Image: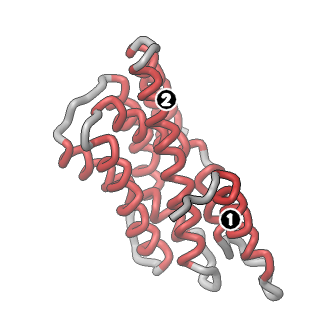
């Protein structure tokens, strides 16, 4: 079996992102398609910082945490997205999101070595808040499946970016630079909490 070249995968992704615009009756509703879901996580600095921090922390942890921690975030974010889409009440969503930026930044700054299961549970808890925010902002008439796949892919991409930075740092940058990045993320979390 021949694996398609990177260009074909990119073209398929672009076409998938554009498929929502082919609907004749969008009624002006936002978040109707895959492209909107893909763009949504990138529109908030809080989400971007938290996702990169998850990747950085997973890279610092290494081993199985390298993929289990980000995977648990993406899966629990999907569950949170469903709660938000269904309109289930979840208190302190904004506080949970801002707190995730602060705490994940601290974990990177300290290069914390929590057990893998505890790391997965912690990021999973934060993921519920992030996913809830995405799901709650989705219009009832939108394609929950395509929109959710979009925000899950964008989130996974941000995790991979964090992992890439963390692994590159391990091969040539001083560890203090990644830890300083974690401190900067934590400081942003403080600003989000007081803002």
- Which x, y percent locates residue 125? 31, 55
Label 2 sits on a secondary structure element that is helix
Q: Nearer the viewer, residue 148 or 126?
A: 148
Q: Earlier in the sequence, mark 1 or mark 2?
A: 1
| Residue 88: quadrant of the picture | bottom left
- Would residue 64 be seen by someone viewing this image from the given angle? yes
- Would residue 194 be seen by someone viewing this image from the given angle? no
Q: Is residue 162 left or right of residue 27?
A: left
Position above or below: 90 against 87: above
Label 1 sits on a secondary structure element that is helix
Residue bearing mark 2:
165
Residue at 46% over, 80% down: 86
Residue found at the far front of this picture: 1
Residue bearing mark 1:
12
Residue at 55% over, 43% down: 48
- Which x, y percent locates residue 147? 59, 71
| Residue 64: quadrant of the picture | top left
- Which x, y percent locates residue 7? 70, 53
Residue at 58% over, 54% down: 41
Q: Nearer the viewer, residue 113 or 166?
A: 166
Tag 1 near tag 2, CB within 8 Å = no
Residue found at the far right of this picture: 24
| Residue 83: quadrant of the picture | bottom left
């Amino acid at each position: 079996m021949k694996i398609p070249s990177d260009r074909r995968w990119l073209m398929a992704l672009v076409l998938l992102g554009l498929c929502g615009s082919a609907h004749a009756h969008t009624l002006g509703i936002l978040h109707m398609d895959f492209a909107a879901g893909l763009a949504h996580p990138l529109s908030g600095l809080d989400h971007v910082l938290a996702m990169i921090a998850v990747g950085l922390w997973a890279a610092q942890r290494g081993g199985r945490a390298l993929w289990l921690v980000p995977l648990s975030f993406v899966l629990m974010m999907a569950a949170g997205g469903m709660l938000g889409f269904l309109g289930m009440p979840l208190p302190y969503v904004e506080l949970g999101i801002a707190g995730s930026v602060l705490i994940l930044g601290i974990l990177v700054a300290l290069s914390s070595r929590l057990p893998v299961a505890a790391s997965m549970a912690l990021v999973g808890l934060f993921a519920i808040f992030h996913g809830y925010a995405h799901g709650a902002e989705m219009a009832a008439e939108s394609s929950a499946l395509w929109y959710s796949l979009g925000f899950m892919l964008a989130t996974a991409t941000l995790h991979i970016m964090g992992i890439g930075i963390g692994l590159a740092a391990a091969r040539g940058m001083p560890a203090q630079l990644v830890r300083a990045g974690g401190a900067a993320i934590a400081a942003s979390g403080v600003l989000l909490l007081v803002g």
